[in-house]
Image: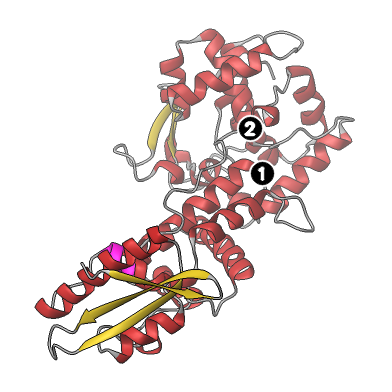
Amino acid sequence: MPSWQKYSVRGKSAYKFRITHPDTKKRSWVRLGVVSKADADEAGNRLDELIEAVKYETDLPPRLVSWLSRLPDQVYERLVTLNLVESRQSTQVPTLEVLLNEYVATKQWKESTRRSRQQTINDLLKYFKPDRAIDRVKVGEAKAFAAWLQKSKPGGRGLAAANARKKIKDSREFFAYARECDYIAKNPFAKISLPPASNPDRLFYVTAEMMDAVFQQIKDPEFRLIVALAYYAGFRTPSEATALCWGDIDWERGQMQIRSPKTAHHANHGIRFCPIFEPLEPYLLAVQSSGGKAEDPVVPMLRTRVNSHLRTQFIRYVEQAGLTPWPRIFQNLRATALTDLADAYPINMVCKWLGNQVQVAMDHYVILRRREYEGPRTGTGGKTS
């Protein structure tokens, strides 16, 4: 590699290299300025790689591209003058906004996935600004963005760990696309630590007495069924209840076919079967009509209702029952269903019915069973209506 020469700048050690252009054979100086000896040694290795790449007209290795991207403009422009690299202004590195729009255009997401990804996109654009060149987003800034997501407002986004985790994974995916397109040499989000997938403090066991009080406040049969599907059969709300059609209800076999958009990419295409537990039956019968078709939705209101309104209305019912709304209002109905079903059936069978991973299910079960509550509910699945 080219050997460096040391010189002094205001009493500090600086380094320069004398290199020979592979085509013109002209010898020229490249001054790094004040840097550490380790940085000077790395520069010698990278300059050697650059000269070899120019000589044999080969692609620049990723570590060389990364090193070039970190060079101060003055040093980089010296390499441009020597015809060893292209000007940074002529390099087609997209801005963050252009990259994200390009990436979205390659996808055919479901509406719920599109909304979720768009929220992450909005956060990235807010934090880094739309006109930020993506090769200027460094690892340290990616870490700062991850911390900002969980930092309390007004200085941060104020997200729970699980939500922040999703957005960091989304960001990692966006920049992985940029890496695949050779826009950047390194994905700044690749090794960012992810917050925990779940927060035990947000798990809550909903007792039968609590749900009895809430059901007394709900007069709409469809809304009662939405809650019952989550509470007795562990439905993901609203996605799985929205997809449920009357053709999925097999009264003769006493089971339901459930289609889950969340696991549609799995080998079973997101389809599973779950018993129609006895406490759930009256809620289904209350909305069943004699002239219904197999393709008709069991809960028509979910085809038109906004998800946030559903949550707001349920919280209102909980408050009207004289209760304090628990965290993750619908998710904890599902967690409670899993917990009680696991009291009555093998955990692997319960996971098959509810579409859970066994380890995640066991974590929830152990945590909730350690909490104080009134005692297991009675009836199939441990619950009564």
Q: Quadrant of residue 281?
A: top right
- Badge 1 amino acid: Ala
- Mark yes or no: residue 181 visible: no
Residue 19 lies left or right of residue 147; in this view the side is left
- SS class, disc 2: loop
Q: Position of residue 259 (x, y in %)?
A: 43, 40
Q: Quadrant of residue 33?
A: bottom left
Residue position marked by numbered label 1 in the rendering:
160
Q: Position of residue 170 (x, y in %)?
A: 48, 55
- SS class, disc 1: loop
Q: Position of residue 317 (x, y in %)?
A: 81, 38
Residue position marked by numbered label 2 in the rendering:
199
Query: Magenta stretch?
Result: 62-66
Q: Residue at x 47, y 74 (%)?
A: 8
Main structural element of the magenta stretch: helix, strand or loop? helix
Q: Quadrant of residue 357?
A: top left
Q: Tell me which numbered mark, 1 or 2, is placed earlier along the sequence.
A: 1
